[in-house]
């Protein structure tokens, strides 16, 4: 692993999500993405839908910034939201153009479900539970990306996209996020910690489901 747990609670989180992680890295989408055999239509579905999902993710991060109990965490999530807007714009202005992919007009069922879940968590769940719902988009997604980088075929047509997984900045942000989860995992009640685990696992499962949906679009 490139980014590891930051204590006992986050170790438990990662251990619980290992089966989902294995499903993802062995999925057809990830295997074919790394092997340069993924049909463009499958990739186009994923990328165009991810642009729409990122808008919801950014909105959730803004809500976390507003709900954060101290200035340090407010600033952390505020910056994540700002960075997320930049990523969304890059996806639209660079990646969709580079791969000649049209913007999606509406969300697909799985991406819509994922987006609604993270937004609802940010709006209504206890703050630590909301954090846990957002973490897989950083931690699990990043580890999947590292797997793709290690197993990619040379001269991969999706190299531009794969390269987005690289870089220390992404890792540093993820470590900080995990540290926050660890802090709350150590101080919250047993029931809140269980809700945090369930939220983390549900988002992890959505990470798998969006790849499955993209891999199975009609060609």
Image (cartoon, rainbow, N blue to C red):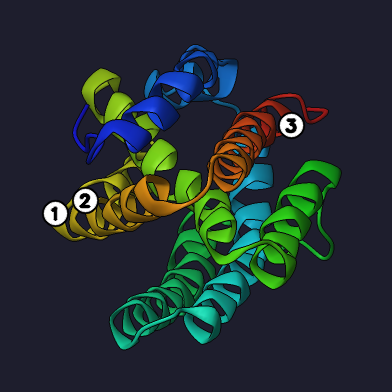
Residue position for label 3: 213
Q: Which residue is mark 1?
A: 168
Q: Which residue is mark 2?
A: 171
Packing grade of label 2 (10 A; few <14, some 14-19, many >=20) is some
Q: Do residues under tags 2 and 1 come within 8 Å of each other at their CB atoms?
A: yes
Q: CA distance from mark 1 to mark 3?
A: 30 Å
Q: CA distance from mark 2 to mark 3?
A: 27 Å
**What residue is shown at x 60% (from left), y 71% (from top)?**
60
Query: Residue drawn at (27%, 53%), measured in percent from left and top?
Result: 179
Q: Earlier in the sequence, mark 1 or mark 3?
A: 1
Point out the tag, 2 or 3, that comes first from the N-terminus. 2
Give the x, y percent position of residue 129: 58, 54
Q: Quadrant of residue 42?
A: top right
Disc 1 is placed on an element classified as helix
Quadrant for the N terminus, please. top left
Q: Position of residue 98 (x, y in %)?
A: 45, 59
Q: Position of residue 212 (x, y in %)?
A: 68, 26
Badge 1: how crowded within 10 Å, few (<14), some, or many (20+)? few
Which is more toward the observer, 83 or 175? Answer: 175
Question: Can you say whether 12 is above or below 142 in the image?
Answer: above
Q: Nearer the viewer, mark 1 or mark 3?
A: 1
Q: CA distance from mark 2 to mark 1?
A: 5 Å
| Res 155 quadrant in image | top left
Q: Residue at x 84, y 62 (%)?
A: 106
Tell me if 134 is positioned left or right of 8 in this view.
right
């Amino acid at each position: 692993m490139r980014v590891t747990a930051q204590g006992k609670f986050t170790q438990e989180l990662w251990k619980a999500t290992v089966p989902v992680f294995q499903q993802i890295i062995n999925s057809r989408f990830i295997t074919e993405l790394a092997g340069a055999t993924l049909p463009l239509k499958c990739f186009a579905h994923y990328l165009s839908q991810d642009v729409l999902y990122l808008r919801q993710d950014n909105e959730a991060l803004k809500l976390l910034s507003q709900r954060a109990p101290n200035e340090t965490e407010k600033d952390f999530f505020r910056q994540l939201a700002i960075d997320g807007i930049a990523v969304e714009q890059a996806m639209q202005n660079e990646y969709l153009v580079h791969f000649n992919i049209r913007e999606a007009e509406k969300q697909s069922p799985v991406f819509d479900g994922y987006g609604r879940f993270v937004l609802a968590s940010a709006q209504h769940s206890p703050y630590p539970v909301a954090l846990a719902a957002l973490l897989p988009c950083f931690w699990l997604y990043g580890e999947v990306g590292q797997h793709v980088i290690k197993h990619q075929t040379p001269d991969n047509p999706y190299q531009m996209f794969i390269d987005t997984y690289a870089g220390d900045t992404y890792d540093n942000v993820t470590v900080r996020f995990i540290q926050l989860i660890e802090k709350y995992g150590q101080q919250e009640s047993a029931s809140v910690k269980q809700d945090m685990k369930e939220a983390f696992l549900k988002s992890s499962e959505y990470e798998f489901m969006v790849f499955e949906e993209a891999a199975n679009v009609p060609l």
